[in-house]
Image (cartoon, rainbow, N blue to C red):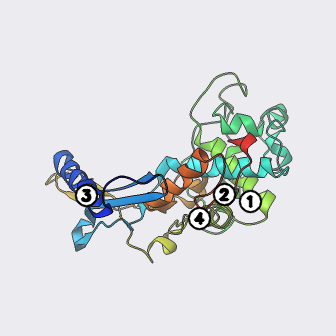
Amino acid sequence: MHLPVKTPLVLARLQSLLAASVERHGVPSASIAVRVGNQTYEAAAGWANRSVGIEATPGSVYHFGSTTKMLTATLVTRLVDQGLVDLDAPIARYVPEFAPPDPSIAQRLTVRHCLTHQAGLIGIIFAETGSNDDTVARQVALLNNAPQFHTPGAVLSYCNSGLILLGRLIECTLRKPWHAAIVQDLAQPLGMHSVASRPEQALRQRYAVGHVPDPRTGQWVPDPQPYWMPGHGPAGSTCAGSARDILSFVTMHLQDGDAVDGTPFLSRRMT
């Protein structure tokens, strides 16, 4: 299905509405992508980096933040779909170095618990573990020394640590670092061509650095720490991409597991 109006008119209207919204809310920039049928419309407004005058464009890449959790979870779901992972198996089956203080937890805490924020682990441990390929594994080592907050499955409790465990599961199963797997095994097959999982990848593109208010002037200035700890990548600290990338990801879930180009990514039973 196509819109019954010419594309330039749609784009002009979308650009006008977005620019007005950016101005009204006083934010540094915004980017949007809208898909109708097989047609995608994109617009952007504001500054990707205000301090050096880099304007936001539809191709600008923005930090995904905790939206990354959906990417990690979807890649785990694909491993389940491929028969490589059992949702109700203990996550220690796939992450053998996971050894919490209570040994029984290692056998009771399942993949599903981590996916549904019911693991009962400490929510998050903000501790730097470097930027090498072992950074996620080193986060798991930190979890091994942390207390269990509640019995797995007892309640829903937002848990970044559970996603870090899932990131390590991906590493152990695919035998590659999470930052490589999320690009090679999820983003690229789904046509998410600008996704960057490491700072050096983002710097090759028109990266929106993120802005914070200057406490002295109230003006927006670039975030002094635009990238967080790589060890928290599976939970949302590093991934960046364009609005079109997110739209491609969402489209797969709305198309019963098929990528934008029609290539199967997940089976219907998993969507």
Reply above or below: 241 against 162. Answer: below
Q: Position of residue 179 (x, y in %)?
A: 62, 64
Please identify the quarter of the rendering in which residue 143 is found. top right
- Distance Cα–Cα, label 2 vs label 1: 9 Å
In terms of secondary structure, where does tag 2 sit?
Answer: helix
At 66% from the left and 30% from the top, the residue drawn is 118
Give the side of residue 239 with respect to residue 26, left or right: right
| Mark drawn on residue 15 | 3
Q: Position of residue 97 (x, y in %)?
A: 81, 51
| Mark drawn on residue 130 | 4
The residue that mark 2 highlights is 136
Give the side of residue 184 with respect to residue 232, left or right: right
Name which of mark 3 and mark 1 comes first in the sequence: 3
Q: Position of residue 57 (x, y in %)?
A: 32, 67
Reply above or below: 152 against 74. Answer: above
Name which of mark 3 and mark 4 comes first in the sequence: 3
- Crowd class of label 1 (few under 14; some 14 to 19; many from 20; radius 10 Å): many
**Cβ–Cβ under 8 Å for marks 2 and 1:** yes
Please identify the quarter of the rendering in which residue 265 is found. bottom right
The residue lying toward the viewer, choosing from 225 and 113, is 113
Name which of mark 3 and mark 2 comes first in the sequence: 3
